[in-house]
Image (cartoon, helix red, strand yellow):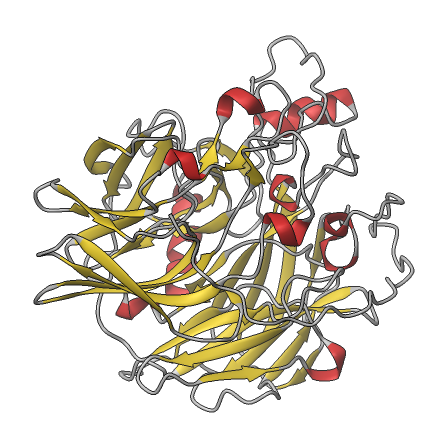
Amino acid sequence: MRDVPLMPPTVVLPQAERPEPRHPADIDWETSNKFLNGPFAPWHEETEAFDLPVEGRLPDDLAGALFRIANNPRFTPLDLDRYHWWEGDGGVAATYIRDGKASFRTKWVMTDTMKVEIEAGEAVYPGFVNGSEPRPLPPGAPPAKNVANTNVGIFADHLLVYFEGGLPTEMHPGTLDTKGSFDFDGGIDVLCTAHHKIDPKTGDLLFFAAVGPNMTWYQADARTGQVVDTFTFSMGCPAMVHDYIVSEHHAIFLISPTQFRIDRIMQGRPGVLWDPGAVPGGSRFAVLDRRTHEVTWYDTGVMLAPTHFFNAYETPTGLVVDLHVIERLGNPATHPDQPVGSHAWFPPAMAWRFTLDSATERATGEMLSGVAGEFPKINDDWLGRKLRYGYFATTRDLSPLTMTDGMARHDFTTGQTLVIEGVDGLTSPSEPVFVQRRGASEENDGYLLSLWWNPATGLSELLVHDTTEFAREPLARVKLPVRVPFAFHGTWAEAEQLDAALAAQDDN
C-alpha cells in the first residue's frame, strides 16, 4: 500500500537564541528538548491582570472571552529527553474583552492526578508518547494521568476542559477555579474527545470516545447538558482518533495507522505508534449516519493520518471532506521503543480534500494547498455546509525552535492560500479562532484571534486580525503579562454566553 506524498520542500532555519528568563515564573530546566524551550517553555505562575496594554484598537463589537489551553508541565518530567508537548499539564489562559479593554487570568486545571503530584512534590506519572521509566504510584492514586490539556470551552453554562484520556474537568468561567470532573449527568463514564463540535442549528454538543478498538458517538443537549444519543461501533483496531468532522446528517472519522496502545503506556513504553499493519488496505473513512446509526466505510487506498479537519458537506453523490493530513504520525511500529525526532514523528501536514462516493464507497483525494500547516479553523456557523474560506497556522520551516511560523487563509473557491507573517518578529502563532462580527450575515465577516510568541520578551501577545482584509498588520495587539506555553486549542465565548455561564455559577 503506497504512502501519500504530502510534504513540499522545506528550509531548515538555524536555531534562534532563547531569551534569558525575565521572570521567576519563566522555567528553564537545562535541556535541549524542543518541547521545553522557546514558545513551549513552562511558565509556573497563576496570573491575573487588568486593563492590559493594547497597540492599535480592539473592535467595539468584540465582547466576550477567549479561552485557551496552556500546555505547561508543573514538575520536572521523569525523562527530560523523552518529554513530549502532548504531555504537559493543563492550564487555562482566559482573555476577557469588553468595551475596548482586555483583562487576563490563567490557572492550572486542578485534576485529581495533579493533586497527587502536588502532594508528592514531583512528577510521578510516566509520559505516554515516548515513554519513561514508571514509578510506583502513591496509595490511592488514579492509575493514569488526566492532564486536561487539549481543549476548553463553554457548553450548557459550564466551562469544560477536555483531554482524551479522561473525563472533562469543569472550571469557573470567571475565576477559573477548578470544580471537578464533569460526566454529562452520568452520560459518560471513562473519557470523551477533546474535539467536540457544536451543532449550528441546535447548539447541541456532538462528540465521541475512542477506547481501544471501539468508537462511541454521543450527542448532548445544549439546555440540560445530558446525553440524548449514543452509539458504538468497532474501528477494527485501537486507532488514535483525535479529531473528526460532521456534515448536516453524518459524523465522519478517519481510521489510520496511528495507534493508541494503552497496554504499552501502562508499561512506561511509547504508546503512540505508526503501524500500517493495523489498516492493511490503507486508511479508511468511517461515516456514521446520525439519524439511523448506519456506518459506511470509504477506502482511501493510501497510508495517511488526519491531524485536524476544516469542514465537510453533503452532495447528491456523497460527501466532501476537507482536512489536514500527514504522511505518518507516531513512533515506527518496527522499532517502537526508540523514539524518533519531533519532525520525523510529526512531519508537516498539508490541506487535502477527499470526495467520498456513496456508490463506490471509495474516497479520492487531492491536495488543496502547497502551504504546510496545522490547526485549521472556519466560521463555525458554517459547519456542515459548503463554505469558501478556511484558516490555519503555517508550518513551512522545519524549525528546531518553533512549530508554527505564520497564519494562512485558504480560498476553497479560487484555490489561493494567502499567508501573513507576524509583525515585529512575532512567531509561533496558536490555532486561530474565528469570531463572526456582530450582526454579520456573510461567512467571512469577522475577526481572527490568535496568540503569538514574542522572542524578544519571552511573552505572548493576542493578535486580532480583520478577516475581510486579512493583512499582516493586526487591528490590535494585546500584550499579555505571561507566556502562554504553546498548546493546542481554544474557543471564543460571546459576552452573552459568558454572562449566562457566570450567572449560572452564582445560582449554584
**Could you tell me which residue is drawn at 29 percent across and 84 percent down?**
442
Q: How many marks?
A: 0
Q: Nearer the viewer, residue 391 or 353?
A: 353
Which residue ends up furthest to the top in the rendered image? 139
The quarter holding residue 160 reads top left
Tell whether 30 sits left or right of 250. right
Tell whether 400 sits left or right of 18. left
Q: Nearer the viewer, residue 508 or 58?
A: 58
- Residue 502: horizontal and vertical position, in percent? 44, 52
- Residue 455: horizontal and vertical position, in percent? 80, 69
Which residue ends up furthest to the front in the rendered image? 1
**Could you tell me which residue is drawn at 50 percent across and 24 percent down?**
262
- Residue 105 in the image: above or below residue 313: above
Q: Nearer the viewer, residue 33 or 300?
A: 300
Visible residue check, residue 59: no
Visible residue check, residue 8: yes
**Could you tell me which residue is drawn at 56 percent across and 78 percent down?**
464
- Residue 435 in the image: above or below residue 506: below
- Residue 476: horizontal and vertical position, in percent? 61, 82
The quarter holding residue 145 reads top right
- Residue 312 in the image: above or below residue 278: below
- The C terminus is located in which quarter? top left
- Residue 307: horizontal and vertical position, in percent? 46, 54
